[in-house]
Image (cartoon, rainbow, N blue to C red):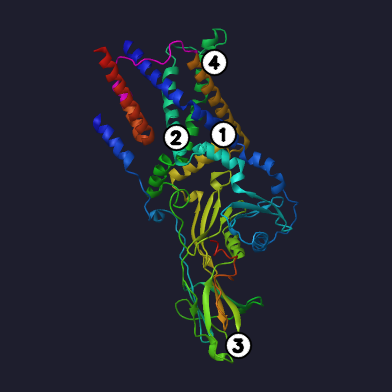
Amino acid sequence: MEQSRRHYQWIWRWHFYAGLIFAPFLLVLAITGAVYLFKAEIEHALYADLYDVKPQSEMMPASHMFAGVKEQYPHAVITRYRPADSADRSAEIGITDHDGTAMTVFVDPHTMQIMGTFDDTDRIMDKLEKIHGELMAGTVGDRLVELAACWALILIITGAYLWWPRKKERIWGVVLPRFSKGSRTLVRDLHVVPAAWISAGMFFLIMTGLPWSGFWGTQVQNAATNSGEGYPPSIWVGEAPLSGLKTEDVADVGWSAENLPVPQSVQSAYVPLSIDDVIHIINERGIKPGYDLFIPQEKTGVYTVSAFPPKAQDEVTMHIDQYTGAVLADYRYEDYGPAGKAIALGITLHKGSQFGMINKLTGLAVCIGMILVIVSGLLLWRKRKHGAPARPAAGVAKGLWALIIMLGILFPLAGASMLGVWIIDQIAKRVRGGFAA
Amino acid sequence: MRKWIIFSSLFLLSGCSLDPDSADQYVAEEKLDAEIDVSAGHIQIATSPGADVSVSFWPEGGQRETLPMQEGKDGVFTAQKRIIEKGIYFVKADIQTNGQHIMPTKKIWVGVEADVEQNGPSVDMKHHH
């Protein structure tokens, strides 16, 4: 009994400090995530005047639209083309202006009218995604988010231990909050009970979000891709194949010069495929609009078709040689390894797109639950009478050490931070020991 | 326990890098290429034996014509074509197999200065610096 009480104290202490430190990060993730679930709906409302066109039966070929955009922005380079995916939707042409600004031009595919242009950095949902993924702080932010996600796992595990009912057949305070036992009990129950309800959802969102992370995610993606079990290369990690350069320069050829009245120089060179031929090849492969086509910017670059629609099963990544039109790689969901399929499905479920509105509302419920749990957790801390919990005198059980070390190995970033906590704890122990002596 | 700490630190430090040949583990596309040669009054296309080949020819801004091709050995196709006027011309080979459809195009300058950087048939993507 005494032993289990001591374990309880240790785990409670971990839960307390980890919660306190990572609460602000997790709060940011929950709020931005809740909004981002509705990206499609929000963007459609924000950009209706750029998206919606009057439907007509005929659509202009891409080359005409490109020419129109080139006329409007003579110094810009076209980097991306997103064909209209329905008769009432505009086409998007991504350009980089001479000063390096990335912009999107919206073109009515029926009339060729340019409906508007915006600076890509102004896209609100992209900013939100940046906050959600890296707190708008680049690599440091990315690592912090990853760390918060890993520690959230520790919070769930330690929280589950603390929540676990020690008396049989208890409902109040375990699966339902107690409203009539004073405010402290109520705040405690409003922390514990919703946490228990949403813990599985939270765990799922963390595990499906972690493959995005720059450190753990990249390592796992590399290992999965290398083993043949993950995404094929170039979708998440790895480079796209290159276009085969035939003759780099213009070559002199002794062609029918002798048939000309006066001897002439005759030269020839391979030229890149026309955009309309590229679209033709994409259509032949059965790919429906809704994809982005990235235009090669280097001599050895390739055309890349990238489609990440709501359902993971419809994903396409295809690379096309810019000189011959040969399809160098064509990866669909069914070509992913089992781990790649799992990650891809996890991503569409995480984003709430896989099963439409029900999926989004489930995600939203978990986010709101998280916000409630974090706020009530912070309230619990404020309501504490004795400040921070003291270091329990007794050691930790071997099983608990094993669990901590296993987590540390599975999530090295969290492992490193736990090592840091352990060192600080040891120093604290020595210092306190010194005082005692 | 110290061993475990050393082991986990090693795992932490040793990154798992991507194998450059990892694409071999996944589905591969049929390799199909073609060489277009223009010399002394004829056009030659060298590609995979058994491929469906058709070749079109046109002067810049002018009418396209399909050239009758003669199939030789080992995927070599030839057509006769004489040019008697200065100008810019295009030869486009349209080659199909079960798994691929390629359309390499060659630009020919007769008596005029080559301008491959500016006037490819696709939108110019170069010189953006």
User: Dot 1: few (<14), some (14–19), or many (≥20) neighbours within 10 Å?
Assistant: many
Q: Is residue A107 left or right of residue B5?
A: right
| Between discs 2 and 4, the one toward the N terminus | 2
Label 4 sits on residue:
A176
Q: Nearer the viewer, mark 2 or mark 4?
A: 2
Q: In terms of depth relative to the viewer, which is nearer, A296 or A321? A: A296
**Please, what is the three-letter code of the amino acid marked with disc 3?**
Ile
Q: Is residue A303 above or below residue A47?
A: below
Image marks 2 and 4: residues in contact by CB distance under 8 Å: no
**Please, what is the three-letter code of the amino acid marked with disc 4?**
Leu
Element type at mark 4: loop
**Please, what is the three-letter code of the amino acid marked with disc 1?**
Thr
Label 1 sits on residue:
A32
Q: Chain of mark 1?
A: A
User: Dot 2: few (<14), some (14–19), or many (≥20) neighbours within 10 Å?
Assistant: some
Q: In terms of depth relative to the viewer, which is nearer, A392 or B32? A: A392
Image marks 3 and 1: residues in contact by CB distance under 8 Å: no
Marks 4/3: CA–CA distance: 92 Å
Q: Give the x, y percent position of residue A415.
A: 35, 32
Main secondary structure of the magenta stretch: loop
Element type at mark 2: helix
| Between discs 4 and 1, the one toward the N terminus | 1
Q: Chain of mark 2?
A: A
**Residue A144, numbered label:** 2
Marks 2/4: CA–CA distance: 34 Å
Marks 1/2: CA–CA distance: 16 Å
Q: Chain of mark 3?
A: B
Q: Is residue A28 left or right of residue A389?
A: right
Q: Residue visible at 35% across and 45% down?
A: B16
**Residue B84, numbered label:** 3
Q: Nearer the viewer, mark 4 or mark 1?
A: 1
